[in-house]
Amino acid sequence: MIPLCSPKQAKVPTALALGTFDGLHAGHLQVIKAITKEGPGVPTVVSFWPHPREILFGESRLRLNLPEEKTSLLEPLGIKQLVLIPFDLNLASLDAETFIQEILIKTLKARRIAVGANFRFGRNRQGDSLALKEIAAKSKIDVSIIPILEDSQGRMSSSRIRHALKEGELKTAAKLLGRPYNFRGIVVKGKGLGRKLGWPTANLEVNGRKFLPGLGVYAAWVWEETKQLRLPAVMNLGPQPTINPHSPSAVEVHLLDQNIELLGKELIVEPLKRLRNQQKFSNLQELSNQIGLDAAMAKSLLKKKV
């Protein structure tokens, strides 16, 4: 696994792909490809954490890829390290030229830099890709500006992926990402209500910064990273409207035709298709019957995908 490090821990000199790169979609890959070609510097992806809008405007910015997930996706691309620049008000106050001189040149000793054409940086986002190219040229640093990638639906963007996931459109999200979407979580102890209904579930504790699909019931693949064996499952994402309509959203997975002790284990979940929206039933027996129908539908869908 490539290292995840701060700017001062990075191996230098560097060849930098600079940006948020949330989702690592095809447009991002074009920027990264520019610095993995032969040339001076350690191929490095540089991003900010937390997202600048969280600090500047107090917005909650959930990520399609958490930093630790990015490392496994970047390594096969030829990237040697992922550097996270801690974003705070002090960093936000730097003008464009100071940011380049202090962070990119002095600390990271950049020899080559690649950015997307829409990249902005510096105090009040005053710097753009052309300004970066002009300032970096004074230090004989080559800057590649990569055009925005578009398809028949418009600009390739993380926002489009988020919208697809929110609508439960897993196929669209996978097409935009270039791979199936997934997330991971630790199995924690629940109230045991699923077991009482005859449908034992694993309750997952998921990192609160991870972007999750829209609420509903899904057919999904589940596996442990150490075992790689994918198991068919039905997943409920959201509150429990029949049992407690005021309960917080939760992620529960029921493994189909399996009886495995999962408490304390980390599971990776790949939702394949949203089967239905959440709904409230008049009693627990109706809920149990519906879960049975959900499980049968999930089993049929996943069997075709083996």
Image (spheres, helix red, strand yellow):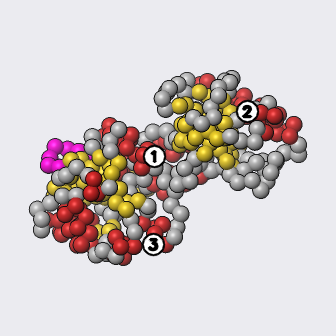
**Percent coordinates x, y for residue 268 in the rendering:** 54, 37
Q: Which of label 3 and label 1 is nearer to you?
A: 3
Measure the alpha-carbon separation of dots 2 and 1: 34 Å
Residue wearing tag 1: 176
Q: Nearer the viewer, residue 121 or 50?
A: 50
Q: In which quarter of the image is the N terminus?
A: top left
Q: Verify whether residue 40 appears in magenta.
A: yes
Q: Which residue is drawn at 49% across and 72% down?
A: 57
In the figure, 239 relative to 107: above or below?
Answer: above
Q: Verify whether residue 108 appears in magenta.
A: no
Q: Quadrant of the C terminus?
A: top right
Element class at badge 3 = helix
Measure the alpha-carbon separation of dots 2 and 3: 43 Å
Q: Over which residues does the magenta segment extend? A: 33-41
**Percent coordinates x, y for residue 222 in the rendering:** 58, 32
Please state which amino acid type lies under the numbered disc 1: Leu
Please state which amino acid type lies under the numbered disc 2: Pro
Residue wearing tag 2: 200
Sequence-earlier tag: 3 or 1:
3
Q: Residue at x 12, y 65 (%)?
A: 139
Element class at badge 1 = helix
Residue wearing tag 3: 56
